[in-house]
Amino acid sequence: MKWLRGVLAALALVGSLAILSVYSGIGGMSCTQGCAAVHSLSISWPLAVIGPILAGAQVWSAFSRPDAFIIISRVAAGGGLALIIAMFALRQVCEWCLFVDLMLVCQGFTTFRGMSVVAAVLGIGALVILAPSAFQKSEPPHVVHFSARTFEGLTRSDWNRPWLVVFSDPECPHCKALYEQVEELRKEGVMVFYRWYILPQDSDTSVKASALVEALSSTDPEGALKLRTAMYATHQNLTPETLTTLARNLGLREDIQGMLENPPTTALATLAADGAVAKDLNVSAVPSLYLIQKLPNGQTSYLHTTIDDVRATLRVAHLPGGNK
């Protein structure tokens, strides 16, 4: 019994050290699942670190408080099981985290009479199945730096919200269909960052429409948001006449016709910058959604996501709305 507990404790500690290395960025280790899922879920305590803490508590009790070992091990096993369920529910399954949490559960089994064999079988299975894939060198999350306008006006509380980048083309019917769902997510608490990705077949009309929104955003951000919403709501082609009519109906006073005929160079530069980021992210179709995660080392990762995955995130984080 003691040797089994010792082996399980050692394996849990090895996995815990790996998780902490991933989380802190030591040795260049990385995790494609973003072990610090806390950053996208807006939880103040990292999910990934809870497993190592529980494992440490088990080992500490074995040496310092043998009388409390059984209770602590069972509590840690319950915590490990809860973390496993949370990982699968949030679709953030990481081999290292799963391995450590399973070791916690196995250790808890050893405290029950007749369950040592179950603990040994489960532990060996986890070691054989999970360890090889966990030790494989994983690709780091794709890191891209958006232009400074992404982070303008953000407050400390904004950094604690889920962030979503949406690449879209204003003439794309699928983008129009998705826009309303994205706006609902924004109202529920997601920080939404709209970015342009112009499809070749829509280049002329889409460039003019997108540049118009960007040009307005520098002088009338609220008007630009209203125009963007109107553009995605209409089923008409975004000809200069349609755009002028939409702007007039919204009461926009700027020289819409002039902006359409000669889009400002700053607006065109913004479109080009968005296109460069989309290229770095290998965007090939729209709409494309990316969930932003702030990594512990200060970098920013962009993980391709879906509306359903973002809604799953919101079920964990209940926050006020935001939009950029």
Image (cartoon, rainbow, N blue to C red):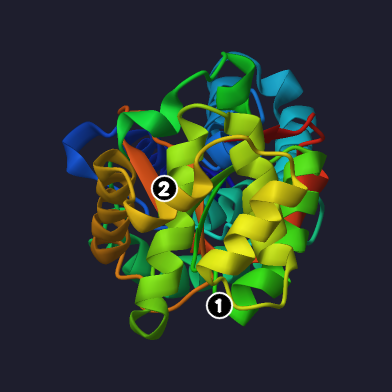
Q: Is residue 216 above or below residue 285?
A: above
Pick the quarter of the image with the C terminus. top right
Q: Which mark is residue 259?
A: 2
Q: Is residue 135 above or below residue 71?
A: below
Q: Residues within 10 Å of mark 2 (few under 14, many from 20)?
A: some
> Which of the marked residues, 2 or 1, is nearer the chain's N terminus?
1
Closer to viewer: mark 2 or mark 1: 2
Q: Is residue 114 left or right of residue 159?
A: right
| Residue at 82% in and 47% down | 315
**Mark 2 belongs to which amino acid?**
Met
Residue 105, percent from left and from top: 68, 51
| Residue at 45% in and 75% down | 129
Q: Is residue 164 above or below residue 202?
A: above
Disc 2, SS:
helix
Q: Nearer the viewer, residue 166 or 261?
A: 261
Q: Which residue is identified by label 1?
A: 172
**Mark 1 belongs to which amino acid?**
Cys
| Residue at 29% in and 60% down | 275
The answer to whether any part of residue 7 appears in the image is: no
Give the alpha-carbon distance from disc 2 to disc 1, as whole Å: 22 Å
